[in-house]
Amino acid sequence: MDREDSVAGVEDPGSKSESVAGVGGLGRKGGGEAERPQPATAATRETDEKKEPRPTTAATAPVPAADAPASLDLTALHKMSPEDLAELAKKFGVFLQPARTRHYHILDLMRAALGAGSTVSAEGFIDQPGESIAFLRSPELNFMPVPEDAAVLRPMLQKFWLRP
């Protein structure tokens, strides 16, 4: 069989195979071929961990401003004026993009509050469009889907026997 007609990885039994360093023939000895890499042992893993300390969650958690509220209510955020939302955003250190809608401003505030360790609460009716996840819809917004709707996972629905 000519070398041009051969299929990659299939050798002619009558031909002498040529080996390339690091390719094929890993089990053969001699010839300066590459060896198989050894799996990491516990000792090497421990030294790797000593070289790269992992950050703790307490060290990486953002600290809220002193005057930032410890909890937010989604319904109260919907009732706030744009000026009040901007003032609250300053307390959390969030810049409200002028091109974004009010719903995304509220979503940005909620993300910043959760990132700072504050609690965010929401009330609404459960809407389950699919089998896996449900959302809390607000009657003040005519039950329309908005970006700041709280998601309720299926295990929580089952645990508390919640129904849409």
Image: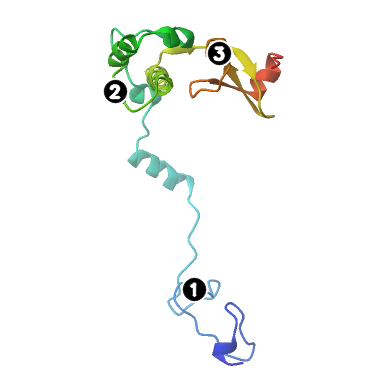
Query: Could you tell me the amino acid type at mark 2?
Result: Phe
Task: State the residue at coordinates (47%, 78%).
Answer: 30
Q: Position of residue 85 (x, y in %)?
A: 34, 13
Query: Could you tell me the amino acid type at mark 3?
Result: Ser
Front: mark 3 or 1: 3
The tally of labels here is 3
Question: Image check: 128 left or right of 48?
Answer: right
**100 vs 125, nearest the viewer:** 100
Image-quadrant location for residue 116? top left
Front: mark 2 or 1: 2
Marks 3 and 1 in Cβ contact (< 8 Å): no
Residue 23: mark in rendering = 1
Q: Is residue 71 above or below residue 98?
A: above
First reached walking from the N terminus: tag 3 or tag 1: 1
Image-quadrant location for residue 102? top left
**15 vs 32, nearest the viewer:** 15
Which quadrant of the figure contains the C terminus? top right
**52 vs 101, nearest the viewer:** 101
Front: mark 2 or 3: 3
Q: What secondary structure is found at the residue carrying circle 2?
A: loop
Q: What secondary structure is found at the residue carrying circle 1?
A: loop
C-alpha separation, residue under disc 2 versus residue under disc 1: 55 Å
Q: Position of residue 123 (x, y in %)?
A: 55, 10
Marks 2 and 3 in Cβ contact (< 8 Å): no
Which quadrant of the figure contains the N terminus? bottom right
Residue 95: mark in rendering = 2
Q: Position of residue 158 (x, y in %)?
A: 70, 19
First reached walking from the N terminus: tag 2 or tag 3: 2
Residue highlighted by disc 3: 138
Task: State the residue at coordinates (31%, 25%).
Answer: 98
First reached walking from the N terminus: tag 2 or tag 1: 1
